Amino acid sequence: DIQMTQSPSSLSASVGDRITITCRASQGIKNDLGWYQHKPGKAPKGLIYAASNLQSGVPSRFSGSGSGTEFTLTISSLQPEDFATYFCLQHNSYPRTFGQGTKVEIK
Amino acid sequence: QVQLQESGPGLVKPSQTLSLTCTVSGGSISSGSYYWSWIRQPAGKGLEWIGRVYTNGGTNYNPSLKSRVTISLDTSKNQFSLNLSSVTAADTAVYYCAREGWDLLGAYYFDSWGQGTLVTVSS
């Protein structure tokens, strides 16, 4: 299985801050990586697919980059509704595997 | 916008079979090219992909669960289901259903998820 290592596991930030979350794959996965947002009790929401493509309806303050084994999710200006848990997911092979998640909290 | 909703017993006894259903609304489960997937998350742990069923009924399973898992479609009810046999306390988790699609370049994504349902395995 491909192991996805996500960091940090949590971070505290303020509205307006720029934040970056990283995922590393245990082997190369080209650009077969997605980023998802999850709020408690809600359905997860897709943000980014193929490493850098915004899913439909996602604000442009979200961006993704990377290929191979290292990937980043950046939120350029954190908004109140962005406080949530974010996780990465590799779509390169089976079984699909996930990062452990990053909880973004209000400072 | 397609919506997914999980349903099923919240409590299952050890050694029994866990059965969940995902009801799809806002679109037909048999139209388009999508995989219909199950994912779970034990409390305090990461997400685990269980498996998926394609529009034509073909399946892929996580090797770690393959001997106990069956995922199937019921097109007449616009639902798909998960059966996990011989459960233990380790199968206690929030279970999510989700839809996986792909674009013209073959890039995959999960674009719709259910809210999740907690299943506890206990006697």
Image: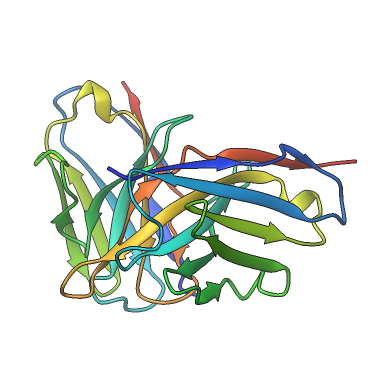
Residue B63 at x, y = what percent? 62, 76
- Please, is residue B58 above or below residue B70 in the view? below
- Please, is residue A95 above or below residue A58 in the view? below
At horizontal 41% and vertical 46% (from top left) the residue drawn is B113
Query: Which residue is the extreme one toward the left?
Result: A60
Frontmost residue, B24 versus A83: B24
Residue A15 at x, y = what percent? 19, 22
Indicate the quadrant where residue A65 lies: bottom left
Residue A43 at x, y = what percent? 42, 38
Q: Is residue B16 left or right of residue A52?
A: right
Q: How is the image coloured?
A: rainbow
Query: Which residue is the extreme one toward the front?
Result: B76
Quadrant in which the N terminus of chain B appears:
top left
Indicate the quadrant where residue A32 lies: bottom left
Residue A41 at x, y = what percent? 48, 29
Frontmost residue, B47 versus B34: B34
Q: Is residue A26 left or right of residue B49?
A: left
At horizontal 16% and vertical 47% (from top left) the residue drawn is A56
Q: Is residue B95 left or right of residue B97?
A: right
Q: Is residue B97 left or right of residue B66?
A: left
Frontmost residue, B103 versus A33: B103
